[in-house]
């Protein structure tokens, strides 16, 4: 406690409801989008039954939509990867729910284990792969919703003209 402050709260702050911020129905800040992803990650009943491992391509499912944002669930079998890409004008929060994913950027390589989160701004280029021998599951929040995912020749190179499969 700061003893230099004269500010004190007398009584029960919950009795002055008009001074409290109403809880928001939808996230609006980076911290709130991260919090949304964490809350979904922590509640496996929201996503576990929707996981599908498809050996022919990464399987993805739109879990939730809200004003200006989308939440996607992705399932990765060993060896599956996104290829180098950006996310158009979307910002995003990537959260690993199960297993381990490897993210490659022009700054290096990092292993993202269950619980790891990455927040990225529009134009961020990365490549995400399941380099392990176990399947992996990830959660992707995009704001605004992902409308394009330009593919790159390498994490630090110019975008190619051909569109890639959405979400990663
Ligand atoms: Fe991505």
Image (cartoon, grey):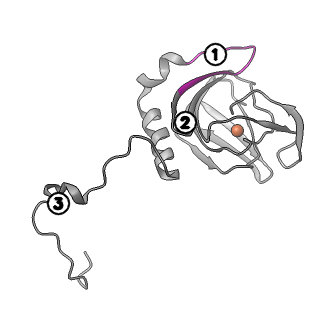
First in sequence, mark 3 or 1: give its number.
Answer: 3
User: CA–CA distance between discs 2 and 1?
Assistant: 17 Å
161 left or right of 166 in image? right
For label 3, count other residues whose C-alpha is less than 10 Å away and answer few (under 14), some (14-19) or many (20+): few
CA gap, disc 3 to disc 1?
49 Å
Task: Specify the quadrant that holds the N terminus.
Answer: bottom left
Q: In this orientation, which residue lies closer to the viewer: 135 or 28? A: 28
The kind of secondary structure element at disc 3 is helix
- Percent across and percent down for residue 148 are 75, 35
Would residue 153 be seen by someone viewing this image from the given angle?
Answer: no
Magenta stretch mostly in which secondary structure? Answer: loop
Q: In the depicted view, which residue is nearer to us: 7 or 134?
A: 7
Of badges 3 and 1, nearer the viewer stands 3
* Residue occupying image coordinates x 41% and y 30%: 43
Disc 2: which residue: 114
Most foreground residue, 78 or 13: 13
Residue segment shown in magenta: 51-63
Give the class, few, some or many, for how many residues have Cα within 10 Å of label 1's Cα (few <14, many ≥20): some
Which residue corresponds to mark 3?
Answer: 13
Residue 53, labelled with which disc? Answer: 1
């Amino acid at each position: 406690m700061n003893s230099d402050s004269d500010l004190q709260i007398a009584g029960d702050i919950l009795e002055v409801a008009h001074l409290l911020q109403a809880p928001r129905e939808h996230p609006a800040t980076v911290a709130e989008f991260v919090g949304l992803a964490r809350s979904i990650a922590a509640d496996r009943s929201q996503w576990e039954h929707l996981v599908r491992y498809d050996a022919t391509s990464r399987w993805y499912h739109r879990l939730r939509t809200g004003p200006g944002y989308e939440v996607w669930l992705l399932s990765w079998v060993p060896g599956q990867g996104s290829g180098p890409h950006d996310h158009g004008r979307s910002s995003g929060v990537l959260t690993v729910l199960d297993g381990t994913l490897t993210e490659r950027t022009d700054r290096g390589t990092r292993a993202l284990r269950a619980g790891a989160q990455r927040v990225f701004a529009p134009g961020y280029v990365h490549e995400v792969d399941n380099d392990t021998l176990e399947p992996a599951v990830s959660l992707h929040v995009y704001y605004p919703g992902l409308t394009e995912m330009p593919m790159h020749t390498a994490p630090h190179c110019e975008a190619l003209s051909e569109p890639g499969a959405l979400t990663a």
